[in-house]
Amino acid sequence: MTVVFFFGIVAVFFYGSILWTGYMSLTRSTLMPNYNFVGFDQYIKLFTNHRWLVSCLNMVIFGVLYIVGTLAFGTLLAVFADRRIRAESLFRTIFLYPLAVSLIVTGLSWRWVLDPVNGLQGLVRGMGWENFTFDWLTDPNRAIYTLVIAGIWHSAGLIMVIILAGLRGVDEDLWKAIRMEGIPLWRAYLQVIFPGMRPVVASCVVLLMSDVIRGYDLVIAMTKGGPGIATEMPAKFAVDYYFARVNLGLASAASIAMLVLSLLLLAPYFYSEFRRRT
Amino acid sequence: MTQSLPGERSVFGPRAARLGLYAFLFASAAFFLLPLLLVISNSLKPMEEIRQGNLLALPVKPTFDAWLTAWKSACTGLECGGVRPGLWNSIKITVPAVVISTLAGALNGYALAQWKWRHANLIMLLVMVGLFIPYQAMLYPTVKILSSLSLFRTYGGIILVHVVYGLPYTTLLFRNFYVGVPEEISRAARMEGASFLRTFRSVILPLSTNILVVVAILQFTGIWNDYLLGLIFAGNDNLPMTVQLTNIVNNARGSASPNVNMAAAVITAIPTLIVYFLSGRYFVRGIAAGAVKG
């Protein structure tokens, strides 16, 4: 009974909050909630807001590069770690530790490493290559890529561990058959092993996608959305409009847009999960 | 040894392939270690060495001065108490939040796994979707709810937020574990006349030490590393370390020197790194379990 009660509270909290936010997104609320219904006005304002559109575009660029990059790098690490290497656990410890480091510290560390004056660029110039340029962090067109680097650094180990667990689950007989057929190793992975691990890869993608949509801390620590608005993200847009710019209606609309996007992206995954189980 | 490798075959022959493999692994290890090592090494330099600007140079005269400043006198705004109060706040927030959210998740997970619920699938769906809801869609109502309970920006409030926001995750992890525990065990206990809570406490919990450790570690890492919730809900007296750290680095009154900033970052990262290195196996098992959801 207590448990049911407990569930009820949490469910009301979560889904009630969402309904509330959804309702606010349809009102004229600014500094204070205002329950005058204005239909989809806030959404029209949102999708004609330059900063929001830039944020969305940034999220797509960051998201695609981050997901593809992390998956590729993590998978390579897993495949190599699965080749019965020496000191496997040492390597695994090194590849995975960034996951224990907060995104705030991750972002700050990379900001210092990539800083044009005191970081890598300054270092290489000091060594004699006066023209060496690596100023992505302060280049509005490239700053987003520095977030990708830091993001991959943080998450590649996670993907490695998950894929490695999947690889360890591959049947020994399958490997025997592959050897008997004389299939080259790279083709064996691409055409036999990975296709058999589709659910594992799917859950990796889902995990990384939710990182992307929620992505806030890394941006705050590394670029604060800059230079200019070059690395703004939807999550930051919503928080800024809730608390710094106090425009509740617009912030709520942005939040609901993020939620809808997550649900749309997740729907295929949930659908297949539930079909598999029932 | 190479003969026993599954599927080992390469155009370059095994030796060249092995060499390439290790080259890749070492390069990757360097990539992962670089930022941490640079930050640690520079945090140990005195200011003169920092000014020379060579990031890669090892400290010539290593000193903990920057660490001491970061620890107790760097300015986070108007106050100049370093990250020390932040450390204490983070501990104060993290420990109870981890304990409560883990135990509550265990109870929920057990109930979900072992009872015949009428809409079990729907409940599971709600819990799983809960995992992926962007916080932004719940932030403002949470502020309002906490304000109406006079808990907004209080110590109790931030713990409550961490517990509630963490519940879908802990519930799911435990539920996946308890699905594998034979139902006969709890049925037997109930036949003896034990209540639900009693069965849970004296029969189920003792079976769950491994998963309890795993979930507690994941929650510890997550809550310690949280920034957004702490910033919004903790209130000025309870700001966690991550927030204090960014305040030191971005201090409007002219930020502290780089070595102090870096020392503050390292100090902030130390607790979760210790947990990670001490609990390696559990940590790995935890994220593997958490990843393969459902």
Image (cartoon, grey):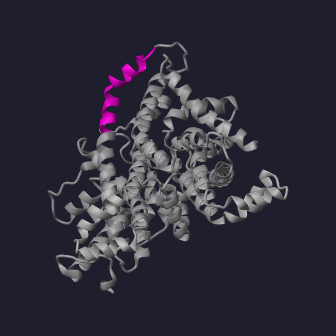
Query: Dividing the picture into quarters, in which one does residue A73 lie?
Result: bottom left
Q: Is residue A112 visible?
A: no
Q: Position of residue A155 (x, y in %)?
A: 40, 57
Q: In this rendering, would B102 be left or right of A80?
A: right
Query: Dividing the picture into quarters, in which one does residue A131 lie?
Result: bottom left
- Give the position of the N terminus of chain B as an image quadrant: bottom left
Q: Tell me where the magenta segment starts and ends, as one range.
A: A39-58
Q: Residue at x 40, y 76 (%)?
A: A88
For the stretch drawn in magenta, the main secondary structure is helix
Q: Position of residue B7 (x, y in %)?
A: 29, 75
User: Camera-side residue: B150 or A252?
Assistant: A252
Q: Position of residue B66 (x, y in %)?
A: 47, 62
A112 to A274, vertically: above or below:
below
Is residue B274 found inside the magenta-colored segment of the image?
Answer: no
Is residue A42 found inside the magenta-colored segment of the image?
Answer: yes
Q: Residue at x 70, y 32 (%)?
A: B149
Q: Is residue B281 visible?
A: yes
Q: Residue at x 54, y 30 (%)?
A: A18
Q: In this rendering, would A183 be left or right of B107?
A: left
Outermost residue, right side: B193
Q: Position of residue A197 (x, y in %)?
A: 37, 59
Count up the numbered dots: 0
Q: In this rendering, would B247 be left or right of A140?
A: right
B175 to B117, vertically: above or below:
below
User: Camera-side residue: A100 or B193?
Assistant: B193
Q: In this rendering, would B153 be left or right of A252?
A: right
